[in-house]
Amino acid sequence: MLDELLGRADLKARIEELEEELRHTERERDAERERRADAVSDRQAAEERANRLEDRIADLEGTVERLETADGERSFARVERLHGERRGEVLDRLASVETGPEGAFTAYVADGHDLPDAVGEAFADRAGLVGRGAPCLAVTDDAGLVGATLSVPDPPVPFTDWADGFVLDREWFEPTGRHTLALVRSDLFAMGVYEGRDRVAFQGFDSDLQQRHSKGGFSQARFERLRDQQVDDHLDRCRAVLEDHDADRLYVVGERTVLDSFEGIADVTGTVDATGDPEAALADARRSFWGVRLRVV
């Protein structure tokens, strides 16, 4: 009854519908990958649709969380996506916090379903919010004046620490040295070499993939084999370029279906949805990958 009065029942029902649609989309994508029966362009469409659904679900969940405060249930006090100068400002504020010995608590939590005991002790009744924000960097103090989680693009190994300030390595959130960021899709490659925030080199190319024919010409099986071989050749070309990179760190982002091919040479991989020509897509991917989600608990 209370859910209906607050308008949450419809939102929760919509979330369930979207989650089921997302699961169905992901099952279609996984089956498609196993059968290798559809064209690469179709797989890209499924990836983009899944990403849009995930974003919509997150928006609706945030609305439900705000409404649930009427029941006294815990919710995030604030959720914000941080980019550029705003990201730096928030990190500077957290870095400026000073306490007595062992007054500031920091933890990197990789799995929200298996919280370290130290996190539960530090956050008390707010620990559930940390689990919901994971994987994340979580910070609080012994007076409960500060409480937040941040997503970490280049995460450390899990840890917990009480000190006189928060443990914040800026390169977890924005690299300061020379590094390479590469965007890889089944039909596109874009690579930028950066000195801090400044791009000092760029390389990019498209892959001319075989288009589907509605009649005549190739059989379906032959068409699929040709497309798969073209994608494999494209990924080989991408790996060859990346193996020659001379930066300190290599970040490879792009389609979830191709990232496994780069785990051996990339320091960090991440899924992003970036479209457009190589240079524009790289800029889009860079903003998405280095975006940090702040949740105030």
Image: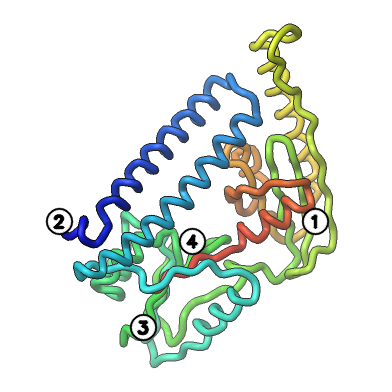
Give the residue at mark 2: 1
Instruction: Say which label, 2 or 3, has the lower sequence index.
Output: 2
Q: As drawn, is 291 to the left or to the right of 109? A: right
In front of the other: 148 or 51: 51
13 vs 75: above or below? above
How crowded pointer 1 is (Cα within 10 Å; few <14, some 14-19, many 20+) is rated as: few
Are discs 3 and 4 less than 8 Å apart at CB? no
- Alpha-carbon span between mark 4 and mark 1: 25 Å
What quarter of the picture does the N terminus occupy?
bottom left
Residue at the spot 68% in from the left edge and 23% down from the top edge: 228
- Alpha-carbon span between mark 2 and mark 3: 38 Å
Q: Position of residue 50 (x, y in %)?
A: 50, 41
Instruction: Say which label, 4 or 1, has the lower sequence index.
Output: 4
- Alpha-carbon span between mark 3 and mark 4: 21 Å
Question: Helix or strand or loop: what does disc 3 sit on?
Answer: strand
Task: Point out the frontmost of discs 1 and 2.
Answer: 2
